[in-house]
Image: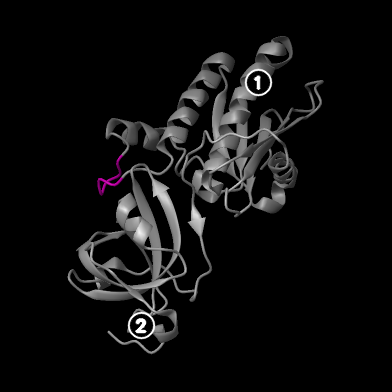
Amino acid sequence: MINPHAVYVNCDGAMDYDSKNTGGVGFVISFPDSIPLEPIPISIGTYIGGNIERLELEALIQAMKKTIKVFEEHYDLLKNIKQIIFVTDRYGLREEGKTSAYNIRGWRKNKWKNFEDKPIKNHKLLDELDKTRKKLSDKTYANISIEYKPRKQNKIADKLAKAGKKEGIKTDKLYRKGEKIGRRKFDGNEIVYSKLKESDYLHVHVFRKDPVQDEWEVWVEICENDNIGNKLKIYTDDNLASKLQRLNEYIVKIKVVYRHHIHIFRTIKKINKKKAKHLTI
């Protein structure tokens, strides 16, 4: 339900899955009917080496920074605003998810590790978002929230983000190494990790690689046997991740099974694509 007394800030990120992972962000600040201010649309770009979640986070951060300036410039008109609602069309970034101040405080206290002692993705941007949100709250005395809306309800911000992609301002501030995504062979869901056993061999197809702090999250899908088509996550370092190339198949041996990912032994075997469909383990 729309709050007629709140300031709404619709945010979005957009990117091209090219060799440089170029992208942009956009947002629009809208005011209640009682405030004589026109909506403020902003496009920012182009970012190099990001991925879509980083761009969505960057959109929220830049929108908060601009909102601080708007409240400073129009204090007399906006001093009675009690609610500022930021809208994202990325479900995981809603207030109850990754951008929750409670979650961020816990991760910060735990040196940006989760309950499995694995690094949190995009921790620098989450840290910046949390600090910027606090600054905005201190400046405006308003309640700050982040809500999820489907993309079809976020069309204006989407257009502004796409416009940002085409601008000539380039930065690698998001990260030097970006998400790398390839086509999947199957459409299966993520495996129930308790089905896997340590020291088992898997025939896998690599379709996605995503940097997580000092590690890589490598997404693969199983090509044979009972779990064929299921996808799973392998966490590893730069060296081993570089050997697990996208769109290639490998025989890997499970070293440790966790609740939401696995570690593998460093010895892997690359499978000849022509022979892959005939291979049995």
The magenta segment is: 113-118
- Give whichever of discs 2 and 1 has the lower sequence position: 1
Query: Which quadrant of the figure has residue 40?
Result: top right
In the picture, the disc for residue 4 is none
Q: Which corner quadrant holds the N terminus?
A: top right
232 relative to 208 in the view: left or right: left
Residue at 18%, 68% in the rendered image? 198
The disc placed on residue 81 is 1
Instruction: Tell me, yes or no, if residue 195 can be seen here.
Output: yes
Q: Magenta segment, principal secondary structure?
A: loop
Q: Is residue 259 above or below residue 281?
A: above
Front-most of residues 82 and 98: 98
Q: Secondary structure at mark 2?
A: loop
Residue lying at the far top of the rendered structure: 76
Residue that numbered label 2 is attached to: 224
**Foreground pick, 260 / 214:** 214
Dot 1 falls on a residue whose secondary structure is loop
Q: Which quarter of the figure has residue 266? A: bottom left
Total marks shown come to: 2
Residue at point 58%, 41% (across, down): 48
x then y, percent, for residue 28 = 72, 34
Residue 117 highlighted magenta (yes or no):
yes
Say few, some or many: other residues with alpha carbon within 10 Å of mark 2 (under 14 / 14 to 19 / 20 or more). Answer: some
Q: As shown in the figure, which amino acid type bears the numbered disc 1?
A: Ile
Give the image location of residue 50, x and y in percent.
53, 44
CB under 8 Å between discs 2 and 1: no
Q: Would residue 46 appear left or right of 194 to someone viewing this image?
A: right
Q: Is residue 12 visible?
A: no
Please name the residue shown 44% across and 42% down the image: 98
**In this rendering, position of residue 27 left or right of residue 193:** right
> How far from the left and from the top, in percent, is residue 217?
37, 54
Work out whether 103 lies above or below 133.
below
